[in-house]
Every structure is written in structure tokens, then in C-alpha cells.
Image (cartoon, rainbow, N blue to C red):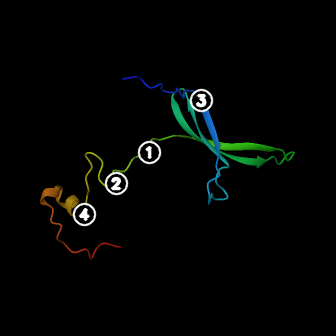
Amino acid sequence: MSEQHKYDNTNKIAIFVNNRDGRAENAPMLTGRVNVEGVDYRISLWAQKSNKDGSTFWAGKIQKDEPREQTNNGTLPPGGSICTSATAAHGNSANADLSGSDDDIPF
């Protein structure tokens, strides 16, 4: 089996034009990612005009890129559990009586 070459993104940056259909007016004009010493960050940039001389510049923010949780098509994550008011009251889902009325549910 041959090894695939893995691209090293350390200390690299990639910026893209945010031209999605339906983009909100206040959405960033450019978005991207940067890796600084092995830590991934998201970048958002907006074009700004200087009050001093009217020149255009880019201003933005950088946020740590937290891994996104993947859903399991509506299933619980491994080791996950559902806590209902009945299980919380009894402390054990095996002994919980779930046949009660739903009249106290506010929706």
C-alpha cells in the first residue's frame, strides 16, 4: 500500500471571496483559514474606508477554529443518553415511569 502525501498547512493561509448567494449585507467579503504553529484559525475580512484619507483597507477578525461536532443522522453520540424529567426525578432510566401526562410541557 502506498502512502499518500499529506500537505503540511503549518504557518499557511488561504483566503477566499465570500460570494455565496443570499449573503447577508454585513457578512465578511473574504473568509479563510490560517494555521499558526499547528493551531487552526478562521479569518473574516471586510473592506473599510479610512476616515482620515478615504483610502480602502481590510479589517477583520480571527477566531480559533473549533472542531465541529458531527451528527450521527439523529442518533446519539457514543455513550450519549437522553435525560427526561422522569429519568432525572428517578435517577435511573430503567426505573423511570414515562407514561405520565404531557400537560406540563410548555410547547
**Residue annotated with mark 3:** 12
**Residue annotated with mark 1:** 68
Do labels 3 and 1 touch, CB within 8 Å?
no
Image quadrant in which you'd find residue 99: bottom left
Foreground residue, 37 or 21?
21
- Is disc 4 placed on a helix, strand or loop? helix
Q: CA distance from mark 1 to mark 4?
A: 29 Å
Looking at the image, is mark 4 or mark 3 earlier in the sequence?
Answer: 3
Looking at the image, is mark 3 or mark 1 earlier in the sequence?
Answer: 3
Q: Is residue 68 left or right of residue 52?
A: left
Q: Quadrant of the C terminus?
A: bottom left
**Residue annotated with mark 4:** 85
Looking at the image, is mark 4 or mark 2 earlier in the sequence?
Answer: 2
Image quadrant in which you'd find residue 84: bottom left
**Residue annotated with mark 2:** 73
Q: CA distance from mark 1 to mark 2?
A: 15 Å
Q: Residue at x 24, y 63 (%)?
A: 85
**Amino acid type shown at disc 1:** Arg
Q: Residue at x 22, y 59 (%)?
A: 88
Looking at the image, is mark 3 or mark 2 earlier in the sequence?
Answer: 3
Looking at the image, is mark 1 or mark 4 earlier in the sequence?
Answer: 1
**Amino acid type shown at disc 3:** Lys
User: Is 4 above or below relative to 25?
Assistant: above
